Amino acid sequence: TGTAAEYGLALVGEDGQTWEDRISIQGLLNTFHELGGQAEAPKSVHDLASQGDPTAIKAWRLYGRILGLALSHAVNMLDPHIIVIGGAMAGAWDHFAPAMMDTLNQHIFTLPRANLKVCRSRLGDRAPLIGAASQVAF
């Protein structure tokens, strides 16, 4: 039906929120607002964290922990050798990756923990554009 791998739509808990609600760009912004931060765009949360804003840093850490938990489910089910993080969020790697990796490693089995590689896409937020362009027939 073309709906495989829509993991982001799975419920996180009993409150009705999905993984996408928590680990999307909008999810990051919502988390920042829930913590009392004021920003109109996720890029602002990145900039604030880079400047040492404690609320922005906390929002990114929470984002990393939630992403790590989501990835742990995928790792335990699919046992991949590599996970590549791309899109707009890859630009904030330094803000969320440590928390993501800590949480991921806490929730996966020993063998995957020893062998799994998690990295940032070299294409960053250009990945979707390059992928879409590759589908155009000439």
Image: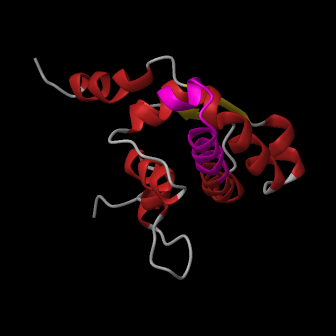
Give residue 103's position: percent from left, percent from top: 75, 50
Residue in front for this viewpoint, 45 or 21: 45
Q: Is residue 82 visible?
A: no
Residue in front for this viewpoint, 79 or 46: 46
Q: Which residues are magenta?
A: 47-65
Q: What residue is rendered at 48% in x and 26% in y?
A: 47
Position above or below: 56 against 127 = below
Q: What residue is rendered at 49% in x and 25% in y?
A: 91
On screen, residue 7 versus residue 39, left or right, reads right
Position above or below: 50 against 60 = above
Location of residue 42 (image quadrant)? top left
Looking at the rendering, in which quadrant would you find the N terminus? bottom left
Q: Residue furthest left?
A: 138
- Residue 61 belongs to magenta span: yes
On screen, residue 112 versus residue 49, left or right, reads right
Give residue 132's position: percent from left, percent from top: 24, 29
Give residue 112's position: percent from left, percent from top: 80, 45
Position above or below: 26 against 82 = below
Location of residue 40 (image quadrant)? top left
Q: What residue is rendered at 41% in x and 32% in y?
A: 44
Give residue 108's position: percent from left, percent from top: 79, 54
Looking at the rendering, in which quadrant would you find the C terminus? top left
On screen, residue 19 versus residue 115, left or right, reads left
Task: Identify the colour scheme used.
Answer: secondary structure
Position above or below: 129 against 34 = above
Q: Is residue 33 visible?
A: yes
Q: How many marks?
A: 0
Residue in front for this viewpoint, 121 or 64: 64
- SS majority, magenta: helix
